């Protein structure tokens, strides 16, 4: 197979987002738009990926460099159009002679399946391939003018199109592919517009003037849906969520009200699991078969093992690992704690940094006091231990296997296996005190 590369254009200003966050660092499904574009390029088998960032967005360049390396980032400065942006990647692709595809960091729904037909056409002998689509409302898009044999003659921007061209339904997605030497040779021939820009689309007419084979392959409109505003970002998120929910439902996951469940790009839920309404999966969550995630729970960076029950109204933070058949109940927060098989924390508790052994019981109101303002220490509760309600376990501390801790205790020292620990003031009762108190105050 011919070697592949991708040039991802990420230099747009994104002013319509009205946000200090660069447009391509906004997220769909918990994943930045830029990372989604890189994911697609990697899925296509691109051995070289170059992200073209603008000088106005150093955050974008840093983000791309952190993932791909600084040598895979090109800076467009000043911004002089899409053709100029692609030429900015030429040095980073020096010596590469395979096929290069140009994509955009603000089309988060364009996956490898949507782009693969472009490479298929290249294998069929087409010199320059453009990805087109037929939108429901084509008015703002550049039109694809084809000849009677299906060859692409030119791309006409909507603003420059006459009435006849505006009747064309076939539109340009912006994505195209060609051998890298050919693409940069064509770009070198693109002339500057009256506005001072170099249009990538001009390479089509130049290639045709050289008697080259230029064709269009088509994808559906949703795949090339761009994001230029918060409203369009929300629309892309909605499409992503519908796709994810369908994928899990088709795979055997129970979701009585799927439209209320929010999923992330890397969520993993096994067949036979059940997700109740209004659950949010932030990135990094795995749910095994037979597990139940009850309503209004929030999970991030967590694992829920087979047959476990989480919620309702539970919060699992990064590092939470809920063991087989364990229960994490209402208003319980777990962070960086491995909860053993069959253990239970059913009510109103915070478990942060440490472990809970198999079969242990954590009473209502238990707090792992893990942070002293500078460092975080760990709390370990042994197998079969019983922690009474309203207990504070001040880390670092270990409660041994089978031990009991009396309700209302503040535990600051280790508790031995099978021991009983009590750490509270002794109860004092003064008979008749309350009646005398009331009498005194009424007389006053």
Image (cartoon, helix red, strand yellow):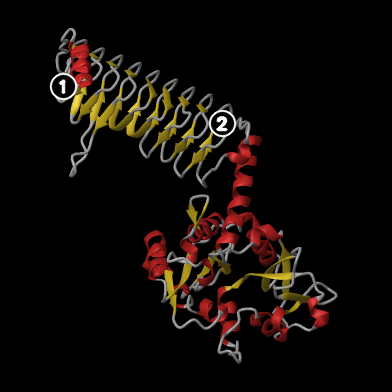
- CA distance separating discs 2 and 1: 39 Å
Query: Along the horizontal axis of the image, is 326 left or right of 424?
Result: right
**Residue drawn at 82 percent across, 75 percent down:** 167
- Return the disc, 2 or 1, that comes first in the chain's sequence: 2
Quarter location, residue 63: bottom left
Apparent side of residue 106 relative to residue 350 in the rendered image (left or right): right
Q: Which residue is mark 1?
A: 414
In the image, 203 versus 194, the foreground residue is 194
Question: In this orientation, does residue 156 appear?
Answer: no
Q: Is residue 197 depicted above or below 371 in this figure?
A: below
Locate residue 263, reporting x and y percent.
54, 43
What percent of the width, then of the height, locates residue 64? 42, 64
Quadrant location, the N terminus: bottom right
Q: Quadrant of residue 168?
A: bottom right
Q: Which mark is residue 51?
A: none
Quadrant holding the C terminus: top left
């Amino acid at each position: 197979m011919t070697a592949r590369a991708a040039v991802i254009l990420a230099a747009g200003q994104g002013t319509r987002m009205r946000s200090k966050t660069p447009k391509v660092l906004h997220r769909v499904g918990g994943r930045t738009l830029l990372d989604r574009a890189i994911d697609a390029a990697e899925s296509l088998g691109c051995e070289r990926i170059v992200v073209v960032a603008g000088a106005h967005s150093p955050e974008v360049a840093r983000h791309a460099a952190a993932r791909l390396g600084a040598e895979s980032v090109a800076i467009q400065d000043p911004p002089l159009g899409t053709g100029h942006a692609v030429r900015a990647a030429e040095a980073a692709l020096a010596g590469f002679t395979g096929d290069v595809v140009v994509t955009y960091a603000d089309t988060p729904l364009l996956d490898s399946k949507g782009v693969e037909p472009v490479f298929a056409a290249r294998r069929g002998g087409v010199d320059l391939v453009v990805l087109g689509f037929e939108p429901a409302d084509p008015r703002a898009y550049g039109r694809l003018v084809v000849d009677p044999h299906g060859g692409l003659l030119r791309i006409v921007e909507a603003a420059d199109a006459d009435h006849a061209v505006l009747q064309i339904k076939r539109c340009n997605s912006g994505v195209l592919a060609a051998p890298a030497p050919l693409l940069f040779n064509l770009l070198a021939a693109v002339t500057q517009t009256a506005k001072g820009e170099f249009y990538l689309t001009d390479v089509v007419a130049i290639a045709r003037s050289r008697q080259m084979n230029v064709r269009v392959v088509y994808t559906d409109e949703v795949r090339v849906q761009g994001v230029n505003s918060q409203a369009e970002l929300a629309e892309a998120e909605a499409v992503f969520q519908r796709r994810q929910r369908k994928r899990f439902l088709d795979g055997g996951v129970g979701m009585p009200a799927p439209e209320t469940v929010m999923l992330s790009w890397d969520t993993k839920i096994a067949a036979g699991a059940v997700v109740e309404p209004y659950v949010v999966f932030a990135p990094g969550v795995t749910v095994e078969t037979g597990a139940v995630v009850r309503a209004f729970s929030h999970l991030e960076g967590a694992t829920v093992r087979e047959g476990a029950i989480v919620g309702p109204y539970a919060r699992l933070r990064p590092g939470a690992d809920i063991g087989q058949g364990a229960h994490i109940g209402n208003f319980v927060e777990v962070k960086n704690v491995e909860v053993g098989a069959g253990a239970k924390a059913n009510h109103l508790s915070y478990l942060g940094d440490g472990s809970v052994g198999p079969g242990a019981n954590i009473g209502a109101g238990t707090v792992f006091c893990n942070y002293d303002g500078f460092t975080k220490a760990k709390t370990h509760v042994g197998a079969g231990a019983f922690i009474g309600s309203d207990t504070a376990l001040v880390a670092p501390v270990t409660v041994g296997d089978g031990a009991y801790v009396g309700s209302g205790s503040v535990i600051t020292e280790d508790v031995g296996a099978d021991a009983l620990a009590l750490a509270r003031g002794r109860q004092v009762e003064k008979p008749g005190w309350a009646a005398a108190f009331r009498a005194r105050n009424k007389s006053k």
